[in-house]
Amino acid sequence: MRSIWNGAISFGLVSIPIKLVNATENHSIHFRQIHLADGGRIRYRKVCELDEEEVSGGEIGKAYEDADGTMIPITDEDLAQLPLPTAKTIEIVAFVPADEIDPLQMDAAYYLSANGVPAAKPYTLLREALKRSNKVAVAKYALRGRERLGMLRVVDDVIAMHGLLWPDEIRAPEGVAPDSDVTVRDAELDLADALMDTLGEVDMDSLHDDYREAVEELIAAKASGEAVQPSESEDSGGGKVIDLIAALESSVRAAKKSRGEGEGEAESEEDMADVHPIKKKTQQKSAPQKSTPKSTGTKKSTASTAKKATQKKTTSKSTSSAASSKGTSSANSAKKQTSSGSRSTTKKKTAAPRKRASA
């Protein structure tokens, strides 16, 4: 691997010559911009704003733009004269437990390679000291024109360094958490724990970029002139309010099935929990039920039955008066009074009251 920086690790009075090598690589597929009309390549050109002429890289320098728009030229010689002790040195400033480093600070990763035979002994000494202490080293170094913060740790038999963001470069998570207070039940936590246990661990080497593979297949198909069929994307149900308990239970079953667990267990439809949106309850007015008074041979039982049925269905003053009237002598009269009471309830008691029956 090609080194991108040569220097030394400063470990107290011990100096370890090292070479800096990139530990990661980017496998993302990069696209070019083209002119849709003719497929011509679109390129960016560096043009001076004053004379509107294109300039080469050798004619371009650095400058700091002041608040009023004034450009203050800064040369490489100006920067080289600054008292920067970490210009060619990775200066270790402390040894701390690894859990004291916030993962949010993690940036680029590098391998530190011993530069030459004399560097082998102090390099191995630092590596074994880091292993035995179960700590990481916090260091300062300069790369690409600025001083940076780093963390040294052991990976197999190599010292690796992670570039770290400075603490003041980490934003506070203000306004990110949910605004409303949410209560999580113990049953939901139990199911979440069960899902975590079912998913278990994973071999990190088995994970791969499915999207990049799909893009590569798309490029190969278009290059060979094949017709590209759009793939059917599954509805993830995003944005829907779901039954959380049912979703967790279904997730646990799906995870077990994917791992081949519980294949011999028979599951009925009643055992399966459906995941569905939670609908808001709406209050609906129940329609009044008609009650038909029983017909008897006496006026007293007919009037009494009609009066009870009318009192349950309406509070209309005119209906109760009519029901208690002595002139009600048949089942047909009681039925008319009940129907009249139902109509007055449906119209929300807006009908005009009838004339009182004379005693």
Image (cartoon, grey):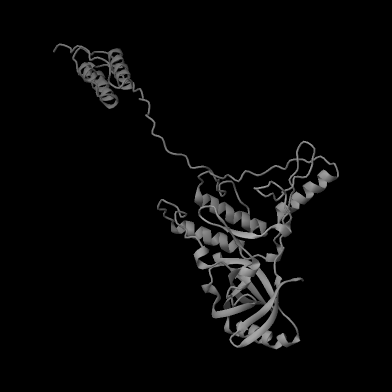
Q: Quadrant of the N terminus?
A: bottom right
Q: Is residue 336 above or below residue 103?
A: above
**Residue 159, x across and y down, in percent:** 66, 78
> Residue pushed farthest front?
51
The answer to whether residue 175 is seen in the rendering is yes
**Residue 20, x across and y down, in percent:** 70, 74
Q: Quadrant of the C terminus?
A: top left
**Residue 75, x across and y down, in percent:** 64, 65
Q: Is residue 265 left or right of residue 287?
A: right
The answer to whether residue 157 is seen in the rendering is no
**Residue 221, x across and y down, in percent:** 82, 45
The total of numbered circles placed on residues is 0
Residue found 66% across the figure and 80% down from its top: 8
Viewer-nearest residue: 221 or 291: 221
Residue found 66% across the figure and 57% down from its top: 258
Q: Picture quarter containing residue 194?
A: bottom right
Viewer-nearest residue: 142 or 63: 63
Q: Is residue 247 left or right of residue 291?
A: right
